[in-house]
Amino acid sequence: MNALPIFDPPELPAPVAERFAPFWAAVEREALALPRCSACGRWQWYPEDGGPHCPDAELVWQDVATTGTLHARTRVHRSFLPTPEPIADPFLVGLIELDGVEGVRLVANLTEDVNGRSPAIGDRVVARFAHLGHRRHPVFMPVPEAMF
């Protein structure tokens, strides 16, 4: 399979829902955090008001690994979200199963590693945190050989 070129993703507006604030606060400190049900321990993404299986439970945000496995990827040519300007270049997003997090996968931007290798399905990936516009974003790249 040919590698797809990686381009900078566009600046997208920050989510306004308060329930996403713990995620973005973790990203600002170069970490990832996801909500987990306080009763059954199941992870949940996207966050809702409570656990989906335990009506009286609360969601508790916990830091999670910044490494995982890439399960799918696609090249985006046209944003599904409103953008201030049209997308000039396509960019890659992937579906990542984070280490130690069962039942949810995170959609995130992808980029090349320092050697110019783009992530392929099944690759181990690691988050790096890049400034895009007015906030930091998690961007996943292939795990460098030195991390094995």
Image (spheres, rainbow, N blue to C red):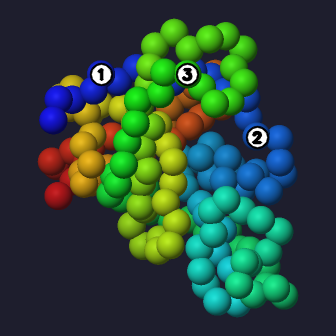
In the rendered image, residue 50, in percent from the top left (x then y), is placed at 79, 75
Gap in angstroms between the C-alphas marked 2 and 1: 28 Å
Gap in angstroms between the C-alphas marked 3 and 1: 16 Å
Nearer the observer, disc 2 or disc 1?
Answer: 1
Classify residue 2 as left or right of residue 100: left
**Tag 3, which secondary structure?**
loop
| Mark 3 burial class by Cα count in 10 Å: few <14, some 14-19, many 20+ | few
Q: Quadrant of the N terminus?
A: top left
In the rendered image, residue 96, in percent from the top left (x then y), is placed at 42, 54
Q: Amino acid at mark 3?
A: Arg
**Residue contact between numbered discs 2 and 3, judged by CB atoms under 8 Å:** no
| Image disc number at residue 5 | 1
- What residue sits 82% from the left and 85% below the top? 55
Quickly name the residue at label 3: 78
Ranked by sequence position, the earlier of labels 3 and 1 is 1
- What residue sits 72% from the left and 78% below the top? 52
45 or 36: nearer the eye? Answer: 45
Q: Is residue 63 above or below residue 133?
A: below
Classify residue 28 as left or right of residue 95: right
Q: Amino acid at mark 2?
A: Pro
Ranked by sequence position, the earlier of labels 2 and 1 is 1
- What residue sits 15% from the left and 48% below the top? 145
Quickly name the residue at label 2: 15
31 or 112: nearer the eye? Answer: 112
